[in-house]
């Protein structure tokens, strides 16, 4: 059972103080609610993505065990957790000292402002606490009806596909969704011989929709062995939202379509956080640093704060630290726009001394970072604002392991190579771009997917397992076209083994 309670007393006074500073600096946020909990509770929340009630699944227990061991052995510590909801909930750790709580509150208000104002979050469901709880109740009912093992195994397969999403969906308004759903319901196409009409939706989905509309189950019109999967090649072609495609076209039972819909909704809720990790953490870090250094710290707290802040900002040669890159890039943007180091005149200046000492006293920095916070994601943030000077100051180089010296060494200091490597890591939030190519491959209603190759080969170990899970849902062979050594290769899983054909 979760053990959290609203803050009170001095902590409530501290919240009002920090909130006053946030208002003074112009932050715009949802109503903020802080709750206090012990470390076991915050581990449970972290394992469940920050939500008290989720559907039952073994992965949450595994994540909880890993977090608990990390804390027990001093490997990691969670200071806070903040949720993108309205009102915005944040959880404080009761063992944190007073300075920790002060820092965390300022950090949370930065996140809250980002959640509310960043464009990529604009269409997320802010009532996700209730949605998650409803999804959990629904999946528990399916487990009671169909068996826990059967439902959990199906969830395993769907979770392996939850990163195959379409970022454009984040900008689909309710009007666009209603229009597409209406077209989908009206869509009918003649078969090649013109003797009958095939509905675009799977029999399971139509049954599920009738259940929703009338409140009772209606038996499928066709027997299970004649699942209605559209045979037209163009159906679903170019679709990057693989879960939506499966709901519409795979031979699913009604409960399976509902499970996919639940997990898909949750995956899209978390997607904006995945594609703005650097910006979001950088923005929150910028504001906890600004609020504490300029307003909230007592003289006796500066050294301790510097120590905590330095620990959070530490960089390694193996991975980038989103907190560090984010805060420093926001600071760099603020400095450049305060001094006028942007635009045609600055970019075309060839005098190195003049450029080094450039200061037009434009004082547009604070205004500019608020604009950037509103419209960018990590890829556009890095692409537009990363500079060679920034990389040199922050010692952002590409590293590789030298087997002779047995240590990480600088591979290159070339700015374009550094920038390209960063963008490659961030592209599609680190996942491959997969889209539907043919829902009637080889005219046998097999599924052909295409990997959009942007210079990084697929990890075939993961691809193999993913195709096996897709086969279990599609019920027919699944193929995947990708590029390897400048040649197209098609991998096919037929239910027994993975085969290749070039």
Image: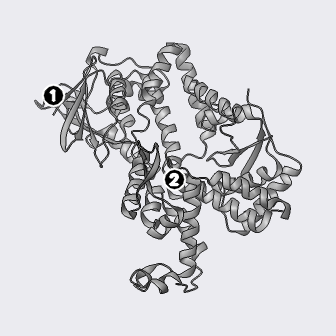
**In the rendered view of the protein, which quadrant contains the N terminus?**
top right
- 491 on left or right of 175: left
Residue 108 drawn at (x, y percent): 68, 53
Residue depicted at 69% across the width and 62% down the height: 289
Residue at point 74%, 54% (across, down): 103
**Of callouts 2 and 1, which one flags the residue occurring earlier in the amino acid sequence?**
2
Extreme-left residue of the structure: 193
Q: Which mark is residue 276?
A: 2
Q: Quadrant of the C terminus?
A: top left
Nearer-the-camera pick, 262 or 188? 262
Residue 300 on image: x %, y %: 85, 61
Dot label at residue 388: none
- Report how many numbered discs are placed on residues in the image: 2
Q: Is residue 186 left or right of residue 340?
A: left
Nearer to the camera, 268 or 65: 65
Residue 167 in view in this figure: no
> Which numbered marker is on residue 443?
1
User: Which mark's residue is nearer the viewer, 2 or 1?
Assistant: 2
Q: Image height check: is 149 above or below 373? A: above
Rendered location of residue 72, percent (x, y): 71, 31
Residue 174 lies left or right of residue 474; in this view the side is right
Q: Secondary structure at mark 2?
A: loop
Horizontal and vertical percent position of residue 494: 25, 21
> Would residue 422 be found to the left or right of residue 96 on screen?
left
């Amino acid at each position: 059972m979760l053990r959290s309670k609203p803050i009170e007393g001095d902590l409530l006074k501290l919240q009002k103080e920090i909130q006053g500073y946030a208002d003074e600096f112009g932050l715009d946020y949802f109503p903020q609610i802080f709750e206090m909990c012990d470390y076991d509770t915050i581990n449970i929340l972290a394992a469940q993505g920050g939500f008290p009630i989720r559907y039952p699944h073994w992965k949450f227990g595994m994540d909880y065990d890993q977090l608990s061991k990390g804390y027990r052995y001093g490997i990691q510590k969670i200071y806070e957790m903040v949720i993108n909801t309205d009102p915005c909930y944040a959880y404080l750790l009761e063992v944190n000292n007073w300075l920790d709580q002060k820092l965390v509150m300022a950090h949370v208000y930065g996140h809250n402002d980002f959640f509310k104002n960043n464009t990529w979050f604009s269409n997320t469901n802010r009532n996700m606490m209730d949605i998650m709880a409803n999804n959990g109740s629904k999946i528990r009912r399916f487990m009671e009806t169909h068996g826990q093992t059967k439902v959990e195994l199906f969830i395993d397969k769907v979770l392996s596909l939850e990163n195959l999403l379409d970022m454009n969906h984040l900008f689909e308004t309710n009007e666009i969704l209603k229009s597409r759903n209406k077209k989908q319901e009206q869509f009918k196409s003649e078969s090649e011989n013109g003797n009958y009409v095939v509905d675009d939706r799977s029999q399971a989905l139509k049954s599920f929709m009738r259940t929703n509309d009338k409140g009772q189950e209606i038996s499928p019109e066709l027997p299970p062995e004649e699942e209605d999967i559209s045979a037209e090649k163009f159906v679903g072609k170019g679709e990057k939202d693989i879960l939506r495609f499966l709901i519409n076209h795979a031979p699913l039972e009604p409960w399976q379509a509902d499970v996919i819909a639940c997990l898909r909704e949750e995956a899209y809720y978390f997607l904006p956080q995945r594609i703005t990790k650097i910006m979001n953490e950088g923005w929150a870090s910028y504001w906890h640093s600004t609020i504490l250094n300029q307003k909230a710290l007592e003289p006796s707290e500066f050294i301790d704060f510097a120590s905590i802040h330095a620990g959070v900002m530490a960089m390694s040669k193996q991975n980038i630290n989103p907190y560090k890159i984010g805060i420093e890039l926001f600071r760099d943007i603020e400095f450049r726009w305060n001094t006028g180091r942007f635009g045609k005149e600055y970019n075309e200046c060839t005098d190195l001394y003049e450029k080094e000492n450039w200061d037009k006293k434009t004082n547009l920095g604070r205004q500019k970072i608020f604009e950037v916070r509103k419209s960018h994601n990590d890829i556009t943030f890095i692409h537009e604002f990363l500079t060679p000077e920034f990389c040199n100051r922050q010692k952002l180089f590409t590293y590789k392991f030298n087997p002779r010296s047995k240590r990480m060494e600088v591979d290159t200091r070339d700015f374009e190579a550094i920038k390209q490597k960063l963008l490659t890591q961030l592209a599609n939030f680190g996942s491959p771009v997969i889209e539907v190519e043919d829902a009637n491959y080889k005219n046998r209603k097999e599924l052909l997917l295409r990997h959009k190759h942007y210079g990084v080969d697929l990890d075939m170990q993961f691809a193999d397992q993913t195709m096996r899970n897709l086969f279990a849902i599609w019920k027919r062979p699944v193929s995947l076209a990708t590029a390897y050594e400048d040649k197209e290769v098609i991998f096919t899983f037929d239910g027994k083994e993975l085969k290749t054909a070039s």
